[in-house]
Image (tube, rainbow, N blue to C red):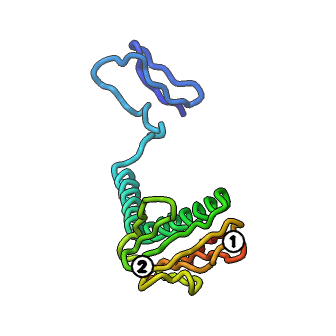
C-alpha cells in the first residue's frame, strides 16, 4: 500500500509503495508521514558523553604511568651515560695507544674520563657500587676502571641502584667489552 498525498491540488499514489516527499503541499496541512522510516544518522548525547569519559580515563592512566616511570628513566639514563663514557675511554685507549681511565668518586656520585676536563654527575639518590682490581682502588670511595692500548682493561662491575631498580655495567678484563644489563 502506497502513501497518498496531495500535490498541486491532485491526489497521487507513489509507485511501488515508496514514500515520497511532495514537491509542494496545498494548504496549511502538511503531513510528515513521508519522512518517517528514513534512518537517522549521528550520535546521541549519551553516546558522546560515554566515549569522552572513556578517552579521558585512558589519558589519565597513561599520565600516571609516565609520571611513575621517571625514576626508572633517570637511573637508566645515568647507566647509559656511564656506559657511553666507558666506551669512549676504551676507544681513546685504542686510538692513542695510551692507557685511559674512568675515575669514579662514589662520595660525590660523579666520574671523570682521563684527558677530559668535564666532571659527570650521577643524579642524587642513585647508589653506585664498584668492583674492580685492587690496584685501581685509589682511596675511600674512589676507584678507577683502566683501559689499555690493546683494548683490554682492569675489568670490573659498576652497579647503579635506586629502590627496586638496578642496572649493572660489566667490563670484561680481557676484551674491554662493556655490557649493560637490567637486574
Q: Residue at x 43, y 15 (%)?
A: 10
User: Along the horizontal axis of the image, is 36 left or right of 90?
Assistant: left
State the image quarter where residue 124 is shown: bottom left
N-terminal label among 1 and 2: 2
Task: Please name whichever residue, 171 or 119, is drawn nearer the observer in this view of the structure.
Answer: 119
Task: Please name whichever residue, 170 or 31, is drawn nearer the observer in this view of the structure.
Answer: 170
Q: Residue furthest front?
A: 98
Please give the label number shown on residue 82.
none
Q: Residue at x 58, y 80 (%)?
A: 157
Marks 1 and 2 in Cβ contact (< 8 Å): no
Q: Residue at x 58, y 66 (%)?
A: 100
Task: Please name whichever residue, 3 or 152, is drawn nearer the observer in this view of the structure.
Answer: 152
Residue designated by label 1: 152
Q: Residue furthest left?
A: 28
Residue designated by label 2: 106
Residue 80: give x, y in percent of width and height: 53, 65
Q: Secondary structure at mark 2?
A: loop
Residue 13: give x, y in percent of width and height: 51, 23
Amino acid at each position: 500500500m502506497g502513501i497518498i498525498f496531495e500535490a498541486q491540488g491532485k491526489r497521487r499514489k507513489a509507485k511501488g509503495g515508496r514514500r515520497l516527499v511532495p514537491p509542494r503541499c496545498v494548504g496549511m496541512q502538511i503531513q510528515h508521514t513521508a519522512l518517517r522510516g528514513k534512518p537517522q544518522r549521528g550520535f546521541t548525547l549519551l553516546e558522546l558523553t560515554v566515549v569522552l569519559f572513556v578517552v579521558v580515563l585512558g589519558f589519565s592512566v597513561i599520565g600516571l604511568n609516565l609520571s611513575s616511570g621517571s625514576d626508572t628513566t633517570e637511573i637508566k639514563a645515568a647507566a647509559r651515560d656511564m656506559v657511553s663514557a666507558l666506551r669512549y675511554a676504551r676507544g681513546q685507549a685504542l686510538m692513542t695507544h695510551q692507557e685511559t681511565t674512568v675515575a669514579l668518586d662514589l662520595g660525590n656520585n660523579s666520574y671523570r674520563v682521563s684527558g677530559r676536563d668535564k666532571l659527570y654527575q650521577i643524579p642524587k639518590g642513585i647508589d653506585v657500587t664498584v668492583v674492580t682490581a685492587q690496584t685501581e682502588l685509589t682511596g675511600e670511595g674512589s676507584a678507577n676502571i683502566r683501559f689499555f692500548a690493546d683494548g683490554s682493561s682492569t675489568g670490573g662491575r659498576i652497579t647503579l641502584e635506586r629502590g627496586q631498580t638496578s642496572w649493572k655495567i660489566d667490563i670484561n678484563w680481557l676484551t674491554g667489552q662493556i655490557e649493560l644489563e637490567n637486574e
